[in-house]
Amino acid sequence: MEEFAVSLLVHCYSGVLRLARLAAYPLIRKGARMHTLHIRERLRLPSARKDFRGRTIVWLHAASLGESKVLVEFLRVLHEKSPEHLYVVTAATASGVGFLEQFRHEAVCAAGYLPYDTVPLMNGMIERFNISRVWLIETELWPSMLWVCAQRAIPVGIANARMEQKSYATYKWFALLFRPLLRRMERVLVQDISYAKRFEAMGVARERIIVTGNFKSRVAIRRPSYDEWKRLRGDLNVSEDCTVITAGCIHGGEGSAIRSAAERIGEKYSSWKWIVVPRHLEEVPELLKSLGPEAVHVREPRISSDWRVCVVAKYGVMEDMYRVADVAVVGGTFVNVGGHNVWEAAQFGVPVLWGPSYHTQRESCERLLSAGVGFSVQNGDELADALMRILKTDAKRFIEAQRAFMENVGSSTQSLKRAIP
């Protein structure tokens, strides 16, 4: 009886989605919304990058940009565990898809938008790529996808799973649909025990739930290759012996702190350079004003003239600017924003510093602090003092701390591999 009820609900849901799309299509097909909603892309399956016939294909799906970054790190772990597998990667938003399409990995055979969650499109996705397993990143529960996988006996798992109180209340409201689908989950790797309890309450068997922590703190630490590092520095007209500080995700109100630190350091070291990557491009004028007249404004990470402070006003260059750095400063922490992803910088094995406002990144920051590879400061003057201490006086101490931290991260990755079926 339950099987019939779930099947009926899923097909009703799928039918409503199809009818809504058909009804809305004439209204938006001639307007800009057709493009911004990426409707055409969501009505077809991702294009293959390489021949995948005869291979075991795993489908990884994320919601937006943040989850897509977690997806990439999880894929690397899966690839180390099963190097013979290939992967289809999808996301639900344009930012997530854009990131996945730029991610080039030998094991990715296709990348694109998640098709509309209708039974026909989900069946088409499974058949087109002969999917053998599905991993959802965090909590992207799509009824048609889960039902089609259940009907075809395809195991589904959730990685870096979380279920906030608001989501939990929603899923309980639709428990007749979601509880039977969640009951069939093969493995749920949750961020903490509170999420584990909610998934269990929604029907996931306790033995299939494993607390693995937040994957964002499991990022692999790896220095960029020398050739890549040298190329990036060459594009920026930076010599190999120059010290580079990359300040990423900087908000308009943080320019004064950066300027104060740059001027204080400049009194002692003329070869130190600052790369500032804004969080929002519309804040660039405010940033340039607060950074002072010597700040250079570029829209591409290429500079031919000499410079000491530059603002690289382009989306999608953050990681390359961290790659080229000797030390990183994470923005959103010198204004009351709460910080941004510190692991984007920490993954490259450099010291990571941030200001006093880091409440949204507290767990990650405290892990870096306790390992001795992350540092918290209060203002621009403290930032300058900390940078000079870390890179000059305490350089050996940081290298030893980084080595121990990398070993610890490697050990936690091995435990994660054991939790993956």
Image (tube, rainbow, N blue to C red):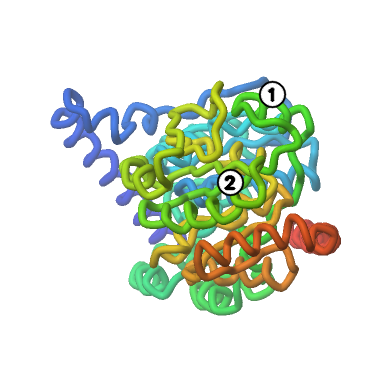
Tag 1 and tag 2, C-beta contact below 8 Å: no
Instruction: Decide if residue 185 is in sight here.
Output: no
Q: Secondary structure at mark 2?
A: strand
- Spatial CA span between label 1 and label 2: 43 Å
Instruction: Decide if residue 168 is in sight here.
Output: yes
Apparent side of residue 134 relative to residue 17 in the rendered image (left or right):
right
| Residue 317, above or below 262 | above
Q: Quadrant of residue 288?
A: top left
Badge 1 is on which residue? 53
The amino acid on which the numbered mark 2 sits, given as a three-letter code, is Thr
The amino acid on which the numbered mark 1 sits, given as a three-letter code, is Arg
**Residue 395, horizontal then vertical, whole percent:** 80, 58
Tally the marks: 2
**Residue 27, horizontal then vertical, whole percent:** 13, 31
Badge 2 is on which residue? 246
Apparent side of residue 179 relative to residue 246 in the rendered image (left or right):
left
